Image: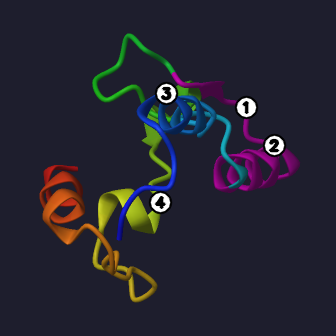
Amino acid sequence: MADNHSKEVRSINMSHIRSTNSKPEEIVRKYLFAEGFRYRKNVKKLPGCPDIVLPKYKTVIFVNGCFWHKHDCPRFVWPSSNQDYWRPKILRN
């Protein structure tokens, strides 16, 4: 399947995809806060820059999506187009 956008337009589109504060992260943070947990977000000085850090409990939480991380989730589906590009990229994550 050919890309319908120029390189410049595709670059702009991809730059708008959130790497932090995604909807799944917001749901987890809202739940934790409602349960009385206090946390820090995206602490860059820790390895892997965890999405949520619970300093009191010395615990970190990573909220990984099914598409980018292929963590054996039953919802994960390999992309049907451009597989030569996506398969190695996803396997690297």
**Crowd band around label 2 with a 10 angstrom C-alpha radius: few (<14), some (14–19), many (20+):** few
Q: Secondary structure at mark 1?
A: loop
For residue 71, side relative to residue 28 (left or right): left
Amino acid type, mark 3: Glu
Image location (x, y in percent) of residue 28? 69, 53
Furthest residue in direction right, as rendered: 34
Say what secondary structure mark 4 lies in.
loop
Q: Which residue is mark 3?
A: 8
State which tag comes first along the sequence, 3 or 1.
Answer: 3
Numbered disc in front, either 4 or 1: 4
Mark identifier at residue 33 = 2
At numbered mark 2, what does the secondary structure look like: helix, strand or loop?
helix
Distance from disc 4 to disc 2, alpha carbons, whole Å, reads: 21 Å
User: What residue did someone put label 4 on?
Assistant: 65
Whether pointer 4 and pointer 2 mark residues with C-beta atoms closer than 8 Å, the reply is no
Q: Quadrant of residue 79?
A: bottom left
Q: What percent of the width, then of the height, locates residue 81?
A: 32, 74
Q: Position of residue 22 (x, y in %)?
A: 66, 45
Q: Which residue is mark 1?
A: 38
**Are discs 1 and 2 less than 8 Å apart at CB?**
yes
Q: Amino acid at mark 2?
A: Phe
| x, y percent for residue 36 | 82, 43
